[in-house]
Amino acid sequence: MAGEVQRGLEDVVALESRICFIDGKQGRLIYRGYDIRDLAARSTFEEVAYLLWYGRLPTAAQLGELARRLESLREIPAELARLIDLLPASAGPMDVLRTAVSALALLEPGEGTPGPTSIGGAQRLTAALPTILGAFHRRRGHLPPLEPRPGLSHAAYLVYALLGREPSELESRAIDVALILHADHDLNASTFAARVTASTLSDLYSAVTSAVGTLKGPLHGGANERVMELLDEIGAAERAEEVVRAKLERHERIMGFGHRVYKVEDPRATILREWSRKVGEAKGNLRYYHLLEKVVEVVHREKGLYPNIDLYSGSVYSLLGIPHDLFTPVFASSRVVGWTAHVLEEYDDLRLIRPTSRYVGPTDLAYVPVADRA
Ligand code: SDX
């Protein structure tokens, strides 16, 4: 391998980890030994967060303690709320998130210091992200700040923080499952960015700031918002064939399809497709669901590509009334657990991540003083 260029680090094994295993050929996803299908069917986001951070499923007492701790960490400092109020209402929510994480590190120094105490920063950020997003969203909508609502699960609190209402049981479970599915995914670009940052012994908040900036990209977490733009462009299912084929003919990427690792359907997409149908049926609105099924059929026939997690997440969020530009922040509010689990693992077995490149530019050029350059 030495000297061979692997663009995009495709198939490069950068490190050993005990957090997440993806079998791209079989379409399997494992968190700390547990199949995502079991976790999505039987677990909660809080339980999966415990699993990813501590490496084992919690006892009932441990789970209760984590849930209480996360609830106690939801409030944000008044200075951060004031900073969010100063940001332009037109700011992109992922940019707001990136700024807020960075600012929180300044307001609460020491929480993210590299080492065993970093778990405190991990839980603080996980608990506070919904509050940060909700504070910005309500501010840009000229809505008053929300009253705290004790007793809500993390998923239900996320919906409450964003929409100012408590979700139904079905909505709460749909978001809980979506958060479980988004929590970790091996060395995806944003997690790798977090690990590179942590590998220099920089702090946990800097690592999460790197990760937020990386997740924003449309080839990564930003795809879920662009899937909805595609569905709105298509409009009716009978236009799907025409619109998608025209895009493919222009060599455009169809957002929500393809994956660097999965060579078959992303198992998370399989699960989310079911939730898109369940929530759509409950709301009497299967428009997005049927549209997506048509797009899947065309893209698979024309390009042999399969859906990834980003294809269906937006249809679930949309049905709850979550605005499209908050979809990637919702992704981040789950993936912060995976990012921080990997940061903790990096601190525990630290090795500076520093690949090299093959230099193909000129060498040994003679220096010409600026006065003599044409
Ligand atoms: C996420 O890494 C992770 O684990 C990420 C993630 C996570 O949980 O963290 O799973 C979350 O980011 C999911 C992916 C979300 N992004 C999108 O849906 C954007 C659209 N997808 C593509 O951009 C693409 O599939 C990537 C970026 C996801 C993967 O790209 P690769 O592995 O670099 O593949 P490639 O660009 O080399 O494409 C291989 C071929 C090309 O065809 P040719 O030019 O060789 O003829 O497949 C084509 C591509 O053009 N192709 C697509 C396509 N994806 C690949 N063609 C049309 N639409 C697409 N979506």
Image: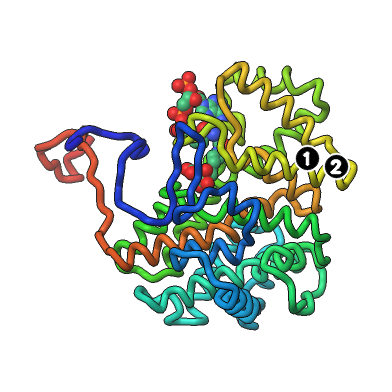
- Position of 56 compared to 154: left or right? left
Question: Which image quadrant for residue 165?
Answer: bottom right
Marker count (numbered): 2
Foreground pick, 50 / 59: 59
State the image coordinates of residue 176 (x, y, percent, origin top left): 68, 58
Residue drawn at x 82%, y 66% as measured from the top left? 166
Residue drawn at x 25%, y 47% as measured from the top left? 355
Amino acid on which disc 1 is placed: Arg
Secondary structure of residue under mark 1: helix
State the image coordinates of residue 96 (x, y, percent, origin top left): 60, 63
Question: Which image quadrant for residue 299?
Answer: top right
Foreground pick, 271 / 328: 271
Q: Which residue is mark 2?
A: 281
Residue drawn at x 64%, y 69% as measured from the top left? 132
- Position of 137 compared to 12: left or right? right
Picture quarter with the C terminus: top left
Picture quarter with the N terminus: top left
Q: Is residue 144 above or below residue 334?
A: below
- Position of 142 compared to 333: left or right? right
Q: Mark 1 near mark 2, Cβ–Cβ under 8 Å?
A: yes
Amino acid on which disc 2 is placed: Glu
State the image coordinates of residue 328 (x, y, percent, origin top left): 62, 51
Mark 1 closeness class: few <14, some 14–19, many ≥20 residues within 10 Å: many
Q: Which residue is mark 1?
A: 277
Q: How is the image coloured?
A: rainbow
The answer to whether any part of residue 28 appears in the image is yes
